Amino acid sequence: MQKKWGKYMAKRVAAMTLAAAMAVSLAGCGGGNPGSPGGSASGTGGTAAQAGAAPTETPAASSEAPKADSSRKTTADSDGRYGKVTVALSSDPQDLAPYTWAGDQSKQYIYYNIYEALFDFRGGGYIPILAKEYQDVDETHTRVTLHDNIYDAAGNHITAQDVVFSTGLLVDSGNAVKYDIFDSVKAIDDYTLEYTWTGPVVQVGALEWPWCRTMVVSQKSYEEIGGFADKPIGTGPYVVSEYVSGAHLTLKANDKYWQTAELRDSNHKANVETIEYDIIAEASQHVIALSTDQIQYSQAVPAENLKDFSEGGQYADRYGVYVTQGSELYTLIPNCSENNLMSDVNLRKAIFYALDNQAIAAATGTSIAARAFGTPFFEDYYPAWESTETYMNTYDLQKAKEYLEQSGYNGETLRLEGFNREDIKSIMTMIQALLLQAGINVEINAKESALVQSDVNNPDAWDILLWNPGGGTQVGEWNRPINYNEFGTGFNMAFLHDDELQELFMTANTVDGHNEENMTRVHDYIVENAYYHALCMPQMNAVYSKDFATLVYRESEFLLPGACDYYLD
């Protein structure tokens, strides 16, 4: 069995609007020359941001997470728990059902407190959690053995049949991402499962979703409650105490947690008694909430405010700063269906060259401009991709207008759809302004997460989709936009059925074929055909209370408050 390859947010809309105005103004002053390729990972060519420009500076910010002071008492060296920690989230999860979290940012932080899967993905491999071990039967069958002492928060015993039930919930919901390798699963006995795959498991991270993203719940609990939208019951180290949609979610430590002290995984601890997630949409309000001690942690602090919490800042006595790269990639996906305007490659190139990635990144306040179709967060991203001049590292308004002249565009209004989040809306507003100066009209449709998810496979719903895929690897992040087997429709997210693209992707997505040469072939083919446009990548601007002794993240970017250590003196 192969193992998966190794290895935010918004600024005020006023600032974004000013940046958009500056971009239009500067372009009107004779700009539009392409910038030179290469250089800084955040630089773009053109006017609104000069080629090779560095990302937003974060004075006194730390690129290292805090280390515990060994002279102080912490939760790591005692049986005590920290009382309560409040974490700010920028969007509302809307519901807490175990099968609705694909693509939802807030749930990435919440769900692993409440729910557990057979395995965690960590350090490049599958780490057993509910599973005890697994063994390949043959190329298309794998048996997984469960621990025999798993109970949910209501005291219901979890068996193999519950895993079968939970898998069915996810598959039937239509949210089973990266499930194309999955054929079926059955219970052999109370603690043994047999998975049947659609073929040999040769893809990088093929079992990420069947094993690591499928949350396991008790069928008895689920059916008695009638769904887990408000009061889910999982096997995790925390239980839901209160959920007020749009306001906050309160979790309490699960004192009946099934893992024994000897068995307990380091990421599944409960070092704090109460975790509260406050839903605070505007990044500026995160700053206020931190300064008034309403919250103790945020990953969405605008770069311009980090100095206030860093050494020498006015709140430095109470807070620390940790800045690092996130995995998400804000990506434009054109609707290339046969009757859509975006099926015109010249129109796609016109749009892409008209977009200044540096200005778009600046509009969010917490992002770095993309220079290739991917993010350096991943080990299988290759910086050489940045050295060739493309629309992702070169802003060229003149070239955009030339491509527009060659297209069939006649002034129609294009529908740009994305999530109703401050960072996404900031990006869409900047896109609208930049395209207007190229002579392209765009209307913005910002929708709630569930509506965007339902529109993904509807070619009549949008012309351009702003999506922010993530993943455990670069090739994994590419999967959902590119792989035409992902949705069972024969088309990928761009409504393409391109056999050459599919073959290139599938080769790069095998363990044996996962190398720079094959990844570069995928990347270059995408650029040649202008199938996708990477805009920017979120920076994780974390501000944390100095009561945190350590910070622990799931997959390097999603805080696990219960697994963090805290000072108790």
Image: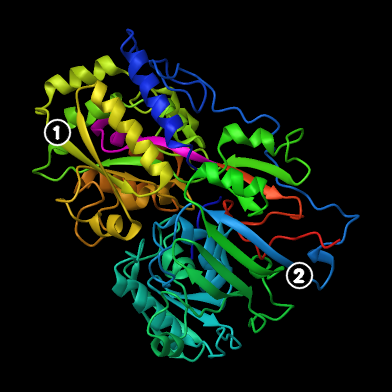
Specify the label residue 81 is tagged with.
Answer: 2
Q: Position of residue 141 (x, y in %)?
A: 40, 75
Where 292 falls versus 366 (above or below)?
below
Q: Is residue 513 in view from this perspective? A: no
Quadrant for the C terminus, please: bottom right
Q: Going 56% across and 54% down the picture, which residue do you hit?
A: 88
Q: Which residue is mark 1?
A: 344
Q: Residues within 10 Å of mark 2 (few under 14, many from 20)?
A: many
Q: Is residue 538 magenta?
A: yes
Residue range highlighted in magenta = 523-539
Q: Is residue 273 left or right of residue 366?
A: right
Point 36% across, 41% down: residue: 425
Q: How many marks?
A: 2
Nearer the observer, 321 or 192: 321
From the viewer's perspective, is residue 477 above or below residue 516? Answer: below
Amino acid on which disc 1 is placed: Asp
Work out how far the residue at label 1 is from the one at label 2, CA to CA, in angstroms. 59 Å
- Name which residue lies at 60% across and 45% down: 288
Q: How is the image coloured?
A: rainbow
Residue pushed farthest top?
Answer: 30
Q: Is residue 366 left or right of residue 418?
A: right
Looking at the rendered image, the disc whose residue lies closer to the viewer, 1 or 2, is 2
Element type where label 2 sits in the image: loop
Residue 516 is drawn in which quadrant? top left
Identify the residue at image location x=34%, y=57%: 449
Would you say 531 lies left or right of 296 here? left
Above or below, 490 against 291 in this view is below
Asked whether, in this view, residue 380 is left or right of residue 534, the answer is right
Where residue 494 appears, as percent x and y from the top left, is: 23, 46
